[in-house]
Image: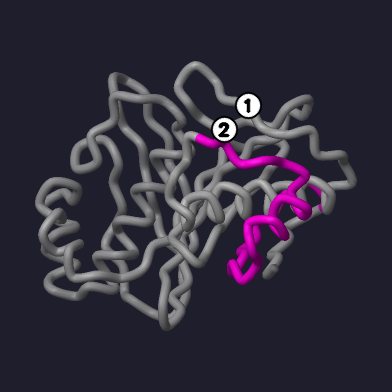
Amino acid sequence: MKLQKYNAQSGWALWFITETEQELEAASGARVDDSIASYTKRLEWLAGRSLLKELVEHCGLEFYGLEKNEFGKPMLHKHPHHISLSHSYPYVAAQIDLYTEVGIDLEQPKAKLLNIAPRILASGELADAGQDVLKHCVYWCAKEALYKSYGKRGLHFADHLLVKPFNLARMGDLHGSIKIDGFSRQLPLQYRIQPDYVLVCTKI
């Protein structure tokens, strides 16, 4: 597990799945839902809970499991902390913070992002990304992180979730914003690029 800790009640972590389903059940203290048929999805489900358990314990707390709010957003049972989860096999990422809504997303750069870009990127973002798959992946992850931070439905990625153009580097900061129906929030993000994945999360 790779852990990036901001303070005693805030941080994010990354898990590279090498364990079997049985090993992850032991690590997480949970049993995977039988309705999840895909083996990789079962591993992601268990690894996500194992990772959140680690983060909660790093906050000095006991992990009591997860529940979902009325919008389907995952929440910690018995703790007020905000959490976010992302997975792209064999990776799982999670973020936690006591006071601030968080969002984290991890994706593997793929050419198909160029095909869906016109539906999710604003015109300025499209122009900035061009044909650069890595940059498209950063934009996609950033918008997913913004979406998870907002935590409610009804958002249109191209209209309501905006990311300012940026110069691509191995890691850096992004300026994101959420604007919908009179609601407006500026949200700083950070990204990092590895050979086989891109990760973006809210900057606490």
Residue at the spot 69% in from the left edge and 68% down from the top edge:
1
Q: Is residue 58 above or below residue 80?
A: below
Residue that badge 2 annotates: 74
Asked whether residue 192 is drawn in magenta, I would say: no
Residue type highlighted by circle 1: Glu
Asked whether residue 9 is drawn in magenta, I would say: yes
- The reply to whether discs 2 and 1 touch (Cβ–Cβ < 8 Å) is yes
Q: Which residues are magenta?
A: 8-34
Give the mark, 2 or 1, whose residue is nearer the N terminus: 1
Residue at the spot 53% in from the left edge and 49% down from the top edge:
42
Residue type highlighted by circle 2: Pro
Residue at the spot 38% in from the left edge and 30% down from the top edge:
184
Q: Quadrant of residue 93?
A: bottom right
Residue 114 in the image, given as x and y percentages of width and height: 14, 64
Residue that badge 1 annotates: 67
Image position of 165 (left or right of 178): left
Residue at the spot 31% in from the left edge and 70% down from the top edge:
109
Image position of 76 (left or right of 142): right
Q: Is residue 142 above or below residue 66?
A: below
Residue 72 in the image, given as x and y percentages of width and height: 47, 26
For the residue labelled by badge 2, is the local secondary structure a helix, a strand or a loop?
A: strand
Image position of 104 (left or right of 59): left
Q: Is residue 65 above or below residue 129?
A: above
Image position of 2 (left or right of 88): right
Cα separation, mark 2 vs mark 1, equals: 6 Å
For the residue labelled by badge 1, is the local secondary structure a helix, a strand or a loop?
A: strand
Please name whichever residue, 66 or 83, is drawn nearer the observer in this view of the structure. 66
